[in-house]
């Protein structure tokens, strides 16, 4: 079986997409060494996982839309693949071979008010058309599958739920190895991983932390460390902290390297994830695999991913977030219990399982 994967995903601006496509491809090659996987366009072969072939981009209109509609099918024909897998929302509408598209969430469709960009209607229309034209849709959670069916009018039989995995490099800290944290970051701190935008609802954590800092115990020195690209809300979060006389309460790092990210997870008191909408929430699993307690919102796919291993809260209840922060900072027994439960929960999420479920989709599509 020859599978063509949109090569541009390996260098996507979205860190979650990059993690997904690399983890999936490595998992596929591990569970079925007879597979031939070809990256169609995008990065050159030196940047791809070992064992992945590469076909350069043929001529196409100079835009992402032009690439997806014309360049990607041409690359697939040049590579003689049996199936195209588009791992991030957009896929060819016409192709000589079946197309599988992964849609991680449909927040754009279900909550367009969070994306007030001039041309966002075009992106939403293209996402919808890609989903409806594909032979099969893959998504990360049962929640997201229901949202796709409702938002795009796609029969549930054409949607496969394939949870994401976690890289083996995310593991608990060695207690004998000191944390080498970035400049300006000191323990104790709460960590948020992911792009900073409106639906991540980070204001509630900033307000809760500022209230908690006025209480007692370990909390007064605590900060919120933000690791991810700022999509327009970071200045407001920092301004809130500054107005409260605690500018050190919010620390923006921007996008960080893999090595630094793993250190941040391992050394954090907890991951905070107050998001209003997620199709999965990969940082939740990465944190649990790192032995880091999770405080997250009881919304969208998050309970499905975290299960009983984290503290799940109403994303709008600032008081509940304050209480949770005070507890997690001051209760070592609670942290130890959550670390243990998180490790057990994270063990369910492997790229091998992701690969096996995805491979089953490929076989079903090609046998149809």
Image: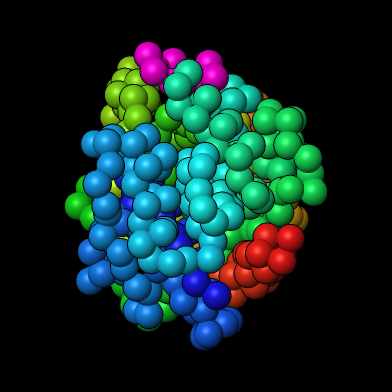
| Nearest the eye: 147 or 214 | 147
Residue 31, above or below 45: below
- x%, y% of residue 83? 54, 61
Q: Quadrant of the C terminus?
A: bottom right
Magenta stretch containing residue 4, yes or no?
Answer: no
- x%, y% of residue 323? 62, 37
Residue 156, above or below 25: above
For this orientation, the residue located farthest to the left is: 183
Q: Residue at x 59, y 70 (%)?
A: 355
- Can residue 100 be seen here? The reply is yes
**Residue 358 placement: quadrant:** bottom right
Q: Residue at x 41, y 59 (%)?
A: 77
- Count numbered badges in the picture: 0
Q: Quadrant of the N terminus?
A: bottom right
Q: Residue at x 52, y 25 (%)?
A: 125
- x%, y% of residue 23? 47, 67
Residue 365, above or below 28: above
- Can residue 318 be seen here? The reply is no
Magenta stretch containing residue 117, yes or no?
Answer: yes
| Nearest the eye: 233 or 327 | 233
Q: How is the image coloured?
A: rainbow
Segment colored magenta? 112-120
Q: Residue at x 58, y 60 (%)?
A: 164
For this orientation, the residue located farthest to the bottom is: 33
């Amino acid at each position: 079986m020859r599978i063509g994967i949109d090569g541009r995903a390996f260098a996507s601006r979205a860190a979650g997409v990059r993690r997904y496509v690399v983890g999936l491809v490595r998992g596929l090659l591990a569970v079925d060494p007879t597979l031939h996987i070809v990256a169609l366009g995008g990065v050159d072969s030196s940047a791809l996982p070992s064992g992945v072939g590469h076909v350069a981009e043929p001529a196409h209109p100079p835009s992402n839309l032009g690439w997806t509609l014309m360049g990607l099918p041409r690359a697939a024909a040049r590579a003689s693949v049996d199936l195209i897998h588009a791992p991030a929302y957009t896929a060819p509408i016409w192709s000589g071979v079946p197309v599988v598209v992964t849609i991680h969430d449909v927040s754009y469709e279900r909550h367009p008010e969070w994306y007030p960009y001039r041309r966002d209607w075009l992106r939403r229309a293209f996402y919808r058309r890609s989903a409806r034209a594909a032979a099969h849709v893959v998504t990360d959670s049962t929640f997201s599958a229901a949202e796709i069916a409702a938002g795009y009018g796609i029969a549930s039989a054409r949607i496969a739920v394939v949870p994401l995995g976690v890289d083996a490099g995310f593991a608990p800290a060695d207690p004998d190895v000191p944390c080498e944290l970035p400049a300006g970051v000191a323990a104790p701190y709460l960590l948020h991983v992911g792009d900073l935008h409106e639906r991540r609802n980070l204001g509630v954590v900033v307000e809760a932390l500022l209230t908690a800092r006025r209480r007692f115990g370990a909390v007064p020195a605590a900060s919120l460390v933000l690791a991810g690209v700022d999509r327009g809300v970071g200045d407001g979060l920092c301004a809130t902290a500054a107005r409260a006389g605690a500018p050190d309460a919010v620390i923006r790092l921007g996008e960080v390297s893999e090595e630094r990210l793993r250190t941040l997870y391992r050394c954090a008191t907890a991951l905070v994830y107050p998001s209003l909408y997620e199709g999965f929430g990969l940082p939740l699993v990465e944190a649990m695999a790192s032995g880091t307690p999770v405080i997250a919102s009881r919304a969208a796919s998050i309970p499905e991913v975290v299960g009983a291993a984290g503290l799940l809260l109403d994303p709008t209840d600032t008081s509940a977030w304050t209480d949770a922060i005070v507890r997690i900072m001051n209760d070592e027994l609670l942290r130890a219990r959550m670390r243990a439960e998180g490790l057990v929960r994270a063990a369910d999420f492997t790229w091998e399982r992701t690969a096996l479920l995805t491979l089953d989709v490929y076989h079903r599509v090609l046998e149809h």
